[in-house]
Amino acid sequence: MTKISFVIPCYGSELSLESVVSDIKAVISTRANELDYEIILVNDKSPDNVWAVIKKLTEADKKIRGFHFSKNFGQHAALMAGYKKATGEIIISLDDDGQTPANESLTLIDKINEGYDVVFGKYQERKDSSFRKFGTYVNKKMAEILVGKPKNVEITSFYAIKRYVIDEIVKYDNSYPYIYGLIFRTTYNCVNVTIKHEHRVTGKSGYTLKKLLSLWLNGFTSFSVKPLRIATIMGFICSVAGFIFIIYTFIERILNPELPAGYAITISVLLFIGGIIMIILGIVGEYIGRLYISMNKAPQYVIKDSTDV
């Protein structure tokens, strides 16, 4: 019998979580002779009453386990916490808002059993807001450029992973986990299966612009030095452009001595080059700052309470 671990980060899902858990149990029951399960619910310091809901669910079913963060550490930290507690041979991650259809879990499991290491659900049509779709697009492109995501694989928050990949992922103990980077530095044996994306049961996405920027920075600075290389190239291009402009100005001044001094263009060039320098310094500073925090062993997350006994 194969054990499946469902890991669900919880934030703002007081009204939807019970329905999601019920759907998981219903779909697994259709293969009760083949599959065992556990459900790991990680409360990422949600402002609503979701921790009370989690405790209620764990009391009703001993196969459900709950963990409560001391503060909001983010979705990827919650996933890391769940992965470290998971004991299944296949781990499935899904959202707590009902948009990732739990009844499609068997589709992911069947595809994993064909020999793939990671199977991502690919939505026929996304039901997200335009802001969330934009964030997903940027995340996709970032994963392709910085962490080597195969271009033919679309990443989503609904996926199944084999045990050995999870064992490698949880070895990462730095302060800023980025799950997709950890996946693709472990394996490229990934594939998509097409599923239906549901509307949210209630509420709205917990991802704000600030949280999306934080997630992107994790991907930029934790798993690639390409931003530094891009900054170097930009600096080189600006230097060459500045040198060419100096030569051009010098020749133009000789040929047309009556031309007035180019105050406006000089200021424009200075502002452009100054902006590039600030961007480069910001990128370097971000790397140094994160290195400093990691050296000081800032935790990925802190579990304040748990339903495990």
Image (cartoon, rainbow, N blue to C red):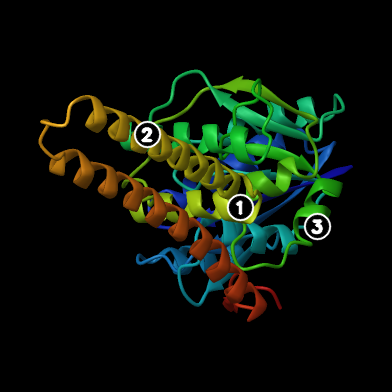
Q: How far from the left and from the top, in percent, is residue 95?
A: 52, 45
Q: Nearer the viewer, residue 156 or 56?
A: 156
What is the number of the mark on residue 178? 1
* 154 sits left or right of 74 in the view: right
Residue 71 in view in this figure: yes
* Residue that label 2 marks: 247
Using a 10 Å C-alpha cutoff, classify the residue at mark 2 as few (fewer than 14 neighbours), some (14 to 19) or many (20 or more): few
Residue appearing at x 63%, y 73% in the figure = 294
Q: Nearer the viewer, residue 232 or 161?
A: 232
- State how far apart marks 2 and 1 are (Cα): 46 Å
* Relative vertical location of residue 233 with respect to residue 225 in this rendering, above or below: above
* Residue that label 3 marks: 87
Q: Nearer the viewer, residue 34 or 80?
A: 80
Name the mark nearer the viewer: 3 or 1: 1
Using a 10 Å C-alpha cutoff, classify the residue at mark 1 as few (fewer than 14 neighbours), some (14 to 19) or many (20 or more): many
Q: How far from the left and from the top, in percent, is residue 98?
A: 46, 40
Name the mark nearer the viewer: 2 or 1: 2
Q: How far from the left and from the top, in percent, is residue 184?
A: 72, 40
Mark 3 vs 1, N-terminal side:
3
Mark 2 vs 1, N-terminal side:
1
| Rendering quarter of residue 261 | top left
In the picture, the quarter occupied by the N terminus is top right
- State how far apart marks 3 and 1 are (Cα): 21 Å
Per the image, label 1 sits on a secondary structure element best described as loop
- State how far apart marks 3 and 2 are (Cα): 67 Å
Per the image, label 3 sits on a secondary structure element best described as loop
Q: How far from the left and from the top, in percent, is residue 37?
A: 75, 49
Mark 3 vs 2, N-terminal side:
3
The amino acid at mark 1 is Tyr
The amino acid at mark 3 is Thr
Residue 98 in view in this figure: no
